[in-house]
Image (cartoon, helix red, strand yellow):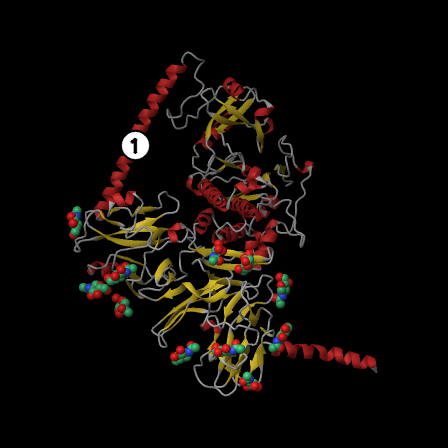
């Protein structure tokens, strides 16, 4: 009997529990919320109750994340009027107001109601919105009051930031006064609807910084990924309202946007891994986010020093002040406008100027926009309004202020100029002048070089025979070095000079007599072809010149030795730094992103721009060399058989490549194409972001390799957890996200799904839409390479990365 009761109890227990937790997010007119009690949203994400901020003993009604260990207040009801003790009681009363009363039943704080209702209830929603609605009316969104219309210093996803023109009410953020006092501080964050809407941080009434204007996709400025997988952004503007809103796609994601007492607005995400808040981006993020820093027509560029420069064809208005870094007077046109006959010049890669004195039209085309601007002498510039639909017109009527260089998110603007600056002929003239200048430059440099070489030749006449035939004589004439010179430079290939073992033989460091440092690749005998073939190959490789390819200086073929001589790279190869526990901290995110971009451009050149289609076939971290400035240079290209014309895919008997970087179709079927290089590139990108090798990657929760791990986190919207821990928070998450997305696109199973290197370069530069990646190839398999699998060169297995040359049994 007892047992039956017990089981009966077990059966109804969940029901009891459900009713308790179900009701626990709501109070009605018969209930109160006393200090010490709390409401919890239905999914357990938010909690509402009484709290004391910082070291203060005052009591406030506020809301915080329930499940987060760091108490983070996201909303305060009575921010201006604290309770002095714990006697406060929160009630909801007809006709639909929330009131907070103290011991003597005096109302400390109350909400307003938009219409009277008989049976009001107050409910804490799972979005963090505290609403008052009619108890009988369960329709969503039919609220008579909501805390989302009265935020304090925190924006939560789902909130609409902006204006209701009908009620003349604005929803904006305002900072706390101090950590102990949530009352309204000096700074506020607004969607400013003047001209064309922008996001603006104000200190009292003065503008501190500006994001935007809205470009059809987002507010350019803070590094906001174009295809942010975690948010859906929207911007609504009509006669009644204008607002900006972001909604979480994955509801479990925890994110907030705040403005703090020093005017910094920041987007935060909760890191499950770090158990702390991670800054996603900050505004102002650098000095160039300071409003109007460079004055009118000045352009701020964090990369240059000093940061301000005049736009091209503009000159400082007050040259002396400008030199003293007083930029406030800004710049003026070199040539005055004449209204009639003015022209427009295109400036790109910029953050658009302050649009508060602008006008717009959403239907005009760019050409109509230009005509409109030309017609009105007060029009100073125009641009396209919406880069997504490629339509609309935005026109400025004043001096252009607050312009900065934006690398990823930069936009284009057409600025009115005097016809003397450039007319249609002028442009051509400019190009012609450019060409002339470069020709003259080339001639001068060439002459200089010739003289220099003459002199050098004369000088070294006394020495042994010239060892170094300069390559200017004939393009195909690759410098051939004398063996004795190489032997001397490398101390007879002494072990101390050995830099490492590459795919085709060991590499030595050498020092020429003139002091030039070189790297000598001594081709192993096994990999050697016939003499003529090799010469042709070397001449051909030497023609490939790009700043992201290691430059070949010459070769040496003598007796049974054949060698390639390269420029020497002081920072050795990427793997040495990237996978080293301490050294990898040297690679901050900026450098890593630079390296990723460099490799992409180098590879693009090999694949497309070099005219000769080259497939690298062995792209990997140890084949990326770094120069003094950490510029990446691809090495060992062109050694695997190159092939010409429009042949895009081939099958080979020799599989040359490295496990961990090889695409499935290449490793399994020996099929290679530019897309197999793209695969290797994708692996490399993910390795650079994470600082971990694909091969040898392990994770306690699953048996996926790095690709699988990245894919898993990406699907769960947790990509940022991939980032190398040694970067801490010092990275632009948009660049990181972009890199990860591109990396995942490149390692997709099906070669046709992988992007070409040209679209990779565009996507990394934030110029192309990034499609959704599909499942990567080889995302669980781990390769075990045994010695006998590798009939490769006499390459000794250094670390766990060996270039494989294997015969495919076909
Ligand atoms: C709601 O539940 C929490 C515990 O989950 C409790 O601390 C709180 O007092 C409850 N609030 C009300 C109004 O019952
Ligand atoms: C509280 O006061 C202590 C000592 O005055 C101080 O160290 C601490 O930072 C204060 N905490 C906050 C949140 O202001
Ligand atoms: C609370 O957080 C923990 C760890 O972050 C998570 O496992 C759990 O699911 C969370 N609970 C809720 C109700 O969100
Ligand atoms: C406050 O109001 C409550 C209920 O309305 C009442 O029971 C209580 O006596 C009042 N207290 C004072 C001090 O007026
Ligand atoms: C309650 O609030 C009223 C009005 O603000 C104030 O005059 C009164 O002193 C407060 N009572 C207590 C006990 O705090
Ligand atoms: C409530 O609304 C009225 C009129 O709309 C306004 O005058 C009053 O200041 C509002 N009160 C609060 C607390 O917002
Ligand atoms: C504002 O935020 C920044 C960055 O998190 C922090 O360094 C600064 O101390 C904050 N200001 C205040 C007053 O908390
Ligand atoms: C441009 O106009 C300003 C004022 O209208 C005048 O002072 C200046 O001399 C003009 N410059 C040229 C180059 O004509
Ligand atoms: C907008 O125009 C007004 C009036 O001409 C001027 O005072 C103000 O400085 C202008 N603002 C901007 C941002 O150009
Ligand atoms: C926008 O431009 C089109 C074409 O010039 C015009 O027909 C339309 O009236 C304009 N709209 C507004 C709001 O000015
Ligand atoms: C030029 O534009 C300004 C600002 O929009 C406007 O006030 C003025 O009427 C326009 N002039 C002409 C001739 O259209």
Q: Looking at the rendering, in which quadrant would you find the C terminus?
A: top right
- Please tell me which residue lies in front, 558 or 461: 461
Residue lying furthest bottom in this view? 118
- Considering every residue shown, the one lying at the far right of the view is 1
The quarter of the picture showing ligand 10: bottom left
Res 608 quadrant in image? top left
Q: Is mark 1 within 8 Å of ligand 8?
A: no
**Residue 399 % position (x, y):** 26, 56
Question: Is 190 or 762 nearer to us in this picture?
Answer: 190
Disc tally is 1
Q: Residue 589 vs residue 526: left or right?
A: left
**On the rendered structure, is 337 left or right of 94?**
left
Instruction: Give coordinates of residue 696: x percent, y percent.
Output: 64, 44
> Is residue 311 positioned above or below 76 on the image?
above
Residue 141 visible? The answer is no
**Residue density around tag 1, few if under 14, some if 14–19, many if 20 or more, within 10 Å:** few
Q: Is residue 312 visible?
A: yes
Rendering coords of residue 109 (x, y %): 48, 77
- Find disc 1 in the rendering and name its residue: 441
Picture coordinates of residue 698, whole percent (x, y):
65, 48
Indicate the quadrant containing the N terminus: top left, top right, bottom left or bottom right. bottom right
Q: Is residue 501 above or below residue 292?
A: above
Q: Secondary structure at mark 1?
A: helix
């Amino acid at each position: 009997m007892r047992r039956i009761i017990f089981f009966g109890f077990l059966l109804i227990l969940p029901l009891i529990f459900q009713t308790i937790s179900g009701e626990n997010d709501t109070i009605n007119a018969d209930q109160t919320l006393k200090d010490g009690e709390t409401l919890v949203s239905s999914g357990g994400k938010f909690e509402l109750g009484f709290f004391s901020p910082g070291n203060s003993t005052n009591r406030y009604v506020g809301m915080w994340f329930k499940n987060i260990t760091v108490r983070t207040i996201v909303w305060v009801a009575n921010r201006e009027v604290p309770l002095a003790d714990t006697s406060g009681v929160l009630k909801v009363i007809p006709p639909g107001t929330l009131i907070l009363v103290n011991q003597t039943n005096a109302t400390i704080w109350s909400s307003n109601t938009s219409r009277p209702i008989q049976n009001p209830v107050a409910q804490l929603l799972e979005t963090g919105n505290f609403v008052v609605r009619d108890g009988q009316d369960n329709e969503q969104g039919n609220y008579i009051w909501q805390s989302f219309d009265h935020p304090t210093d925190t924006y939560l996803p789902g909130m609409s930031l902006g204006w209701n023109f009908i009620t003349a009410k604005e929803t904006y953020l305002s900072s706390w006064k101090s950590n102990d006092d949530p009352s309204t501080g000096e700074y506020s964050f607004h969607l400013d609807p003047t001209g064309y809407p922008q996001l603006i941080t104000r200190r009292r009434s003065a503008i501190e910084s500006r994001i935007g204007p809205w470009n059809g996709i987002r507010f350019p400025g803070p590094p906001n990924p174009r295809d942010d997988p975690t948010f859906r952004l929207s911007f609504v503007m009509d006669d009644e309202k204008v607002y900006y809103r972001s909604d979480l796609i994955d509801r479990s994601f925890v994110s907030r946007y705040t403005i703090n007492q020093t005017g910094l607005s920041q987007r935060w995400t909760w890191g499950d891994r770090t158990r702390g808040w991670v800054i996603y981006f900050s505004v102002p993020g650098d000095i160039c986010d300071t409003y109007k820093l460079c004055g009118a027509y000045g352009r701020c560029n964090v990369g240059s020093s000093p940061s301000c420069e005049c736009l091209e064809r503009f000159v400082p208005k007050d040259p002396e002040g400008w030199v003293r870094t007083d930029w406030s007077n800004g710049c003026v046109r070199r040539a005055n406008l004449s209204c009639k006959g003015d022209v427009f010049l295109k400036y790109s890669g910029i953050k658009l100027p302050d649009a508060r004195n602008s006008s717009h039209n959403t239907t005009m085309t760019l050409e109509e926009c230009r005509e409109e601007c030309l017609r009105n002498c007060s029009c100073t510039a125009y641009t396209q309004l919406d880069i997504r639909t490629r339509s609309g017109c935005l026109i400025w009527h004043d001096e252009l202020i607050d312009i900065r260089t934006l690398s990823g998110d930069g936009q284009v603007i057409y600025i009115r100029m005097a016809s003397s600056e450039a007319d249609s002929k002028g442009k051509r003239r400019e190009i012609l002048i450019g060409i002339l200048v470069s020709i003259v430059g080339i001639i001068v440099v060439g002459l200089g070089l010739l003289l220099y070489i003459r002199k050098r030749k004369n000088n070294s006449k006394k020495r042994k025979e010239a060892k170094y035939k300069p390559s200017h004589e004939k393009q195909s004439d690759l410098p051939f070095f004398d063996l004795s010179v190489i032997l001397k430079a490398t101390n007879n290939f002494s072990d101390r000079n050995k830099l490492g073992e590459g795919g085709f033989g060991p590499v030595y460091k050498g020092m020429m007599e003139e002091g030039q440092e070189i790297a000598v690749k001594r081709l192993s005998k096994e990999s050697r072809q016939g003499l003529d073939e090799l010469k042709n190959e070397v001449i051909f490789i030497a023609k490939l010149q790009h700043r992201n390819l290691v430059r070949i200086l010459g070769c040496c073929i003598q007796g049974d030795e054949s060698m390639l001589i390269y420029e020497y790279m002081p920072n050795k190869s990427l793997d040495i730094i990237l996978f080293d526990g301490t050294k990898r901290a040297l690679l901050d995110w900026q450098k890593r992103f630079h390296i990723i971009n460099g490799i992409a451009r180098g590879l693009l050149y090999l694949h497309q721009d070099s005219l000769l289609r080259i497939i690298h076939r062995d792209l990997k971290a140890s084949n990326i060399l770094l120069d003094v400035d950490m510029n990446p240079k691809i090495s060992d290209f062109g050694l695997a058989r190159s092939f010409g014309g429009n042949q895009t895919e081939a099958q080979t008997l020799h599989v040359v490549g490295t496990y961990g970087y090889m695409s499935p179709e290449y490793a399994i079927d020996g099929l290679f194409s530019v897309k197999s290089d793209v695969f290797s590139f994708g692996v490399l990108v993910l390795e650079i972001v994470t600082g971990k090798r694909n091969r040898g990657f392990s994770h306690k929760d699953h048996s996926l390799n790095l690709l699988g791990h990245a894919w898993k986190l990406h699907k769960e919207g947790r990509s940022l957890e991939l980032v190398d821990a040694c970067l801490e928070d010092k990275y632009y998450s948009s660049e990181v996200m972009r890199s990860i997305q591109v990396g995942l696109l490149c390692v997709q199973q099906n070669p046709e799904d992988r992007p070409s290197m040209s679209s990779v370069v565009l996507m990394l530069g934030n110029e192309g839409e990034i499609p959704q990646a599909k499942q990567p190839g080889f995302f669980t398999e781990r390769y075990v390479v045994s010695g006998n699998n590798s009939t490769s060169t006499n390459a000794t297995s250094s670390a766990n990365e060996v270039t494989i040359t294997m015969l495919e049994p076909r």
